[in-house]
Image (tube, rainbow, N blue to C red):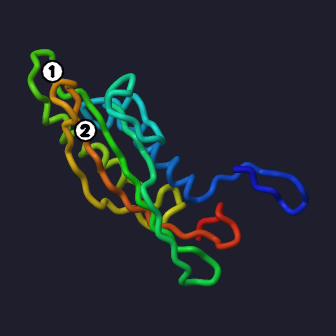
C-alpha cells in the first residue's frame, strides 16, 4: 500500500492487517523437515484454491475470513481477524494405502508453527486456534486436507492503519 505523507512524498507501508497475513504465510513456509516434520511445505498461497489446482503437495492456503472491529478507545481500533489455513497433502502411498497419519502430522505442524509467535512479529496482541477439520476431498484424487481456523486479535492506531498499538 502506498502511503501519502503530508509533504507529498509516498512510502510503501503495509497495514497491520496485511503484515499479520504476510507473517502467517511466511510462518507456514517455515514448516520444514529440519523441525522434525515429515515433509516440507512446497507451496503457500494467499488465495483459496481448489485442492486439485496445486502444482505440488504439500501445500497450504492462507486467507482471511471475516473481521470484527470495535472502538473501545478513541485512539485505536480493536480487531479480531479470522484466518483460515487449508493444508493439503497426498493421501495415498505408492501401494494405494491411505496415509491418515500424515494428515495428523500436517495439522500438528501447522499448529506448532502458528503458535510459535502468537504476537505475529509484534503486530498482534494474541493468536488463538479456533478449531480444525480433517477433509478427504475425493479418495480417487488421493488428496487429504486440514482446515484450521485461527483468530488474530490486534489493535491499530485509528489515524494510521500501519501502526500497531
Residue, x 39% and y 62% (percent of image)? 151
Write down the quadrant of residue 71 in the picture: bottom right
- Place of residue 63 in the rendered image (x, y in percent of width and height, measured from the top left): 44, 48
Circle 2: is it few (<14), some (14-19), or many (20+) Cα within 10 Å? many
Circle 1: is it few (<14), some (14-19), or many (20+) Cα within 10 Å? few
Give SS at disc 2. strand
Q: Is residue 21 above or below residue 103?
A: below
User: Which is nearer the N-term, disc 1 or disc 2?
Assistant: 1
Give SS at disc 1. loop
- Place of residue 25 in the rendered image (x, y in percent of width and height, measured from the top left): 46, 44
Q: CA distance from mark 1 to mark 2?
A: 15 Å
Q: Is residue 20 above or below residue 106?
A: below
Q: Which mark is residue 139?
A: none
Residue, x 22% and y 50% (percent of image)? 133
Along the line of sight, the residue nearer the viewer: 58 or 118 = 58
Along the line of sight, the residue nearer the viewer: 81 or 113 = 81
- Place of residue 94 in the rendered image (x, y in percent of width and height, measured from the top left): 15, 15
Residue, x 65% and y 73% (percent of image)? 158
Residue 95 relative to residue 54: left or right: left
Q: Which mark is residue 145?
A: 2
Write down the quadrant of residue 118 in the picture: bottom left
- Place of residue 128 in the rendered image (x, y in percent of width and height, measured from the top left): 35, 62
Q: Nearer the viewer, mark 1 or mark 2?
A: 2
Residue 2 relative to residue 153: left or right: right
Residue 92 relative to residue 4: left or right: left
**Which residue occupies the extreme right position in the image?**
7
Q: Disc 1 designates what residue?
A: 93
Amino acid at each position: 500500500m502506498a502511503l501519502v505523507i503530508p509533504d507529498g512524498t509516498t512510502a510503501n507501508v503495509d497495514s497491520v492487517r496485511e503484515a499479520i497475513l504476510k507473517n502467517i504465510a511466511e510462518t507456514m513456509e517455515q514448516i520444514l523437515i529440519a523441525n522434525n516434520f515429515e515433509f516440507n511445505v512446497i507451496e503457500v498461497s494467499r488465495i483459496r484454491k481448489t485442492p486439485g489446482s496445486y502444482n505440488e503437495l504439500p501445500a497450504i492456503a492462507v486467507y482471511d475470513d471475516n473481521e470484527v472491529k470495535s472502538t473501545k478507545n478513541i485512539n485505536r481500533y480493536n480487531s479480531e481477524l479470522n484466518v483460515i489455513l487449508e493444508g493439503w497433502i497426498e493421501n495415498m502411498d505408492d501401494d494405494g494405502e491411505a496415509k491418515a497419519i500424515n494428515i495428523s502430522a500436517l495439522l500438528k505442524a501447522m499448529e506448532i508453527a502458528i503458535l510459535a509467535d502468537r504476537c505475529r512479529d509484534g503486530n498482534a496482541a494474541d493468536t488463538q486456534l479456533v478449531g480444525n477439520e480433517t477433509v478427504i476431498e475425493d479418495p480417487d484424487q488421493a488428496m487429504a486436507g486440514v482446515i484450521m481456523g485461527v483468530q488474530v486479535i490486534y489493535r491499530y492506531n485509528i489515524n494510521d492503519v500501519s501502526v500497531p498499538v
